[in-house]
Amino acid sequence: MSYDRVNMEFYRGLSPGTVNILRTAKIADARKTLVSIPPKTLDSSWNMINNRFFGRRRPAPPRPIPPGQYLEDGFPVLSAGPTPPVDTATWEFTIHGPGGNGNDSGTETLGSWDWSALNALPQTELHTDLHCVTKWSKLDTDWRGVTIDTLFEDAGIARPGGFVMAFCDGGYTTNLPVEDIVDGKGLLVHTYDGEPLAPEHGGPVRLLVPHLYLWKSAKWVRGLKLMEQDSPGFWEGYGYHMYGDPWREQRYTND
Amino acid sequence: MDWQIATVESVHAESPRVKLFRLKLPAGQKFSAGQYYDIRLTAPDGYQAQRSYSISSSPEKPGVIELVIELIPGGEVSSYFHEAVVPGERIELRGPIGGHFTWTPNYIKPLLLVAGGSGIAPLMSIIRRRATLDSSPRMLLMFSVRTEHDILFRQELERMAHEDADFDLTITLTRAVPEGWTGETRRIDAQMIDTAFDAATGKTRLREAGTGTPEAAKAAPNPAGQPFGRAYICGGTGFVESIASYLLETGMDYDDIRTERFGP
Ligand SMILES: Cc1cc2nc3c(=O)[nH]c(=O)nc-3n(C[C@H](O)[C@H](O)[C@H](O)COP(=O)(O)OP(=O)(O)OC[C@H]3O[C@@H](n4cnc5c(N)ncnc54)[C@H](O)[C@@H]3O)c2cc1C
């Protein structure tokens, strides 16, 4: 647990004496210590305390996880709709040039790959942690796929600036800055833990951008559209953060 | 989005595994039926846990919201709510959140709601919102629970189904079935969905045929083809996945199926 982040906010607005009581309590076993908090006026920048809450803490993570997250061993599923049936025989991934608005994909095609073309490209393995906005984090996941760098190179696309809108079977979209999907930071993945990626987790192919909340790693991805200006995708249009950095807890607009 | 502090007004054991919590909000933000709040618990040493809970009350009364919390064995936040939270306790939360799994009265086509257990929560808000309207779309709720004791909001739902000809209720018990039970008795499967669709289509035809008999109505063509404009499915992941795929098989449009998954 990254206590420092939590505590900075936690201690804000408290008197130095109270901070010391709390520091001492933190060192002692929380399960045995009850700290009485002096009454104070509440405002939204101060966290309150649930006196009888100690938490069922999982074993400490081997490394810090982002604020507000907990460790999950399973692999929960979250999507806005059903799992769409996707056939690799007709599957195609396309990169579109800028022009038009938002997820309108009716612009110039800069590159496209069918299933076998994708598999014929140089493959990259990635070992990484995942952070979902619904609060779970999953450590040490193993993926295999093709970096966005490889796609750009294969299609002879000079590294663009600006943003992309990822679009998907089922109509899902999400926006990302280009710089967050290049230099090995973004992949199209088709293999999870040595097995073909299951449909409910986005198979046959999903985008994986693990340094951002998982809604940015679009499932059933079918293409990227380059954009000069940032524009909200599906969840972003419903009040989720435009960027989604879990370490800065950017869950919702203005976080 | 700012955190705010709500006060627990009441706690009610709705079933052996589910408690209802009414929370008074300092500033009653407007919300849409189907939205949820994020709750954050803080231990005396600063340790925190956050989870999401759907609003089950109607958006008509945004100042006090109702949450439906199922006890997950060993669950960090749900067990705190079940074991420790009493009226008067202050709870930190922020919201309302979510915009896809929502319904507003602007949408007037017939609705299919499918709930598994505590997945009834956001659907209850939709049902209650609809019930406040003078003119409201036809609605079918298919509600899957383990035993008779697990039927949440039973009285309210049965009364509504009794009084409102446009609100249909199908409850199915997946484990123990009591004597005299006349509802369904298995997990919702493709066949149960088909039966519900046929019945709903019959109703649609009946309406189109005016005061026709069910037989006459059955013979009349149903131009829309689909009895429901939109479906909302909420429950555990396995439940939601299977229902969503049955609905796709009926020919329902991908975009007309909205899902909320509670558990792993
Ligand atoms: C958008 C959204 C809305 C939600 N609305 C509601 C709601 O209205 N009512 C409600 O009760 N819950 C709701 N949930 C689920 C809720 O947020 C918590 O996940 C749930 O209460 C379990 O939290 P916990 O801390 O008690 O258990 P944890 O300590 O997180 O989990 C303990 C163990 O139980 C497993 N587990 C977690 N959840 C479930 C589950 N539902 N079924 C079976 N096993 C589980 C975990 O994988 C873990 O192994 C919602 C979730 C989301 C994402």
Image (cartoon, coloured by chain):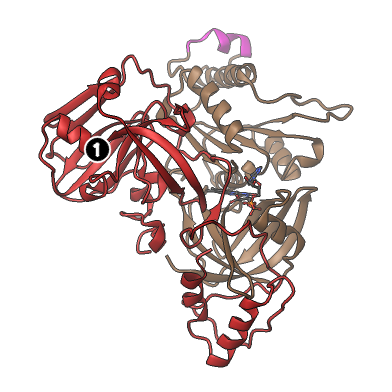
Chain colours: A red, B brown
Does A173 sit above or below residue B178?
below
Please name the amino acid that badge 1 sits on: Ile
Please report, as a chain letter, where disc 1 is located: A
Q: Which residue is at 57% across, 20% downward?
A: B197
Quarter of the figure that contains the C terminus of chain B: top right
Taking the magenta stretch, the answer to whether it contains residue B218 is yes
Q: Which residue is at 46% across, 45% downward?
A: B104
| Few, some or many residues within 10 Å of mark 1 (<14, 14–19, 20+) | many
| Residue B215, percent from left and from top | 62, 9
The magenta-colored residue range is B214-221
Q: Which residue is mark 1?
A: A148
Front residue (pair A132, A253): A132
The image quarter in which residue A143 lies: top left
| Residue B83, percent from left and from top | 76, 61
The image quarter in which residue B200 lies: top right
Q: Which residue is at 42% across, 32% downward?
A: A202
| Residue A210, percent from left and from top | 38, 47
Residue A30 visible in the picture = yes
Front residue (pair A77, A208): A208
